[in-house]
Amino acid sequence: MPVDPQVRARVKASLARLQEVAPGRSVEVRIPPYAAVQAVAGLTHRRGTPSAVVETDADTWLALADGSLTWTEATASGRLIASGERSDLSPWLPLDRPD
């Protein structure tokens, strides 16, 4: 499947925003084939398989980021996989919610 440059830009921008609101390196967030970042305070992951991973497709991630899908809905439907301590990103989603 070809990589859509517009989707890639939106995914990368939203992951950068996640790193701003949840700085750290304890959770690896993977949105293949577009990007992967580390975020959330805690023990820093350096090598090998991280102890906390979130992985989903671009459509699901962007829906979580903009609030059109909740964390609970995404996990219950199997649209994302979250494993390990601190892998629940719901405290930071949606990414641009009013405080």
Image: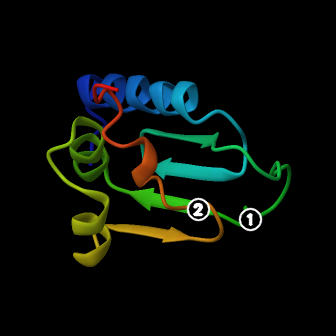
As drawn, 68 above or below 66: below
Whether residue 32 is visible, yes or no, is: no
Give coordinates of residue 33: x percent, y percent: 42, 46
Marks 1 and 2 in Cβ contact (< 8 Å) = yes
Left or right for 30, reference 6: right
As drawn, 76 above or below 61: below
Q: Quadrant of the C terminus?
A: top left
Residue drawn at point x = 71 percent, y = 44 percent? 41
Q: CA distance from mark 1 to mark 2?
A: 9 Å
For mark 2, give the secondary structure: strand
The scheme the figure's colours follow is: rainbow
Give coordinates of residue 17: x percent, y percent: 46, 25
How would you rate the neighbour count of disc 1 (Cα within 10 Å): few for under 14, some for 14-19, many for 20 or more? Answer: few
How would you rate the neighbour count of disc 2 (Cα within 10 Å): few for under 14, some for 14-19, many for 20 or more? Answer: many
Left or right for 14, reference 59: right
For mark 1, give the secondary structure: loop
Residue drawn at point x = 49 percent, y = 61 percent? 88
As drawn, 61 above or below 23: below
Label annotation for residue 53: 2
Give coordinates of residue 80: x percent, y percent: 36, 66
Label annotation for residue 93: none
Mark 1, residue position: 49
Of all residues, the one furthest to the front in this rendering is 99
**Kind of residue at badge 2:** Val
Whether residue 62 is visible, yes or no, is: yes
**Kind of residue at badge 1:** Thr
Q: Quadrant of residue 2?
A: top left
Disc nearest the viewer among 1 and 2 = 2
Residue drawn at point x = 85 percent, y = 49 percent? 46
Residue drawn at point x = 28 percent, y = 25 percent? 98
Give coordinates of residue 78: x percent, y percent: 29, 75
Left or right for 16, reference 75: right
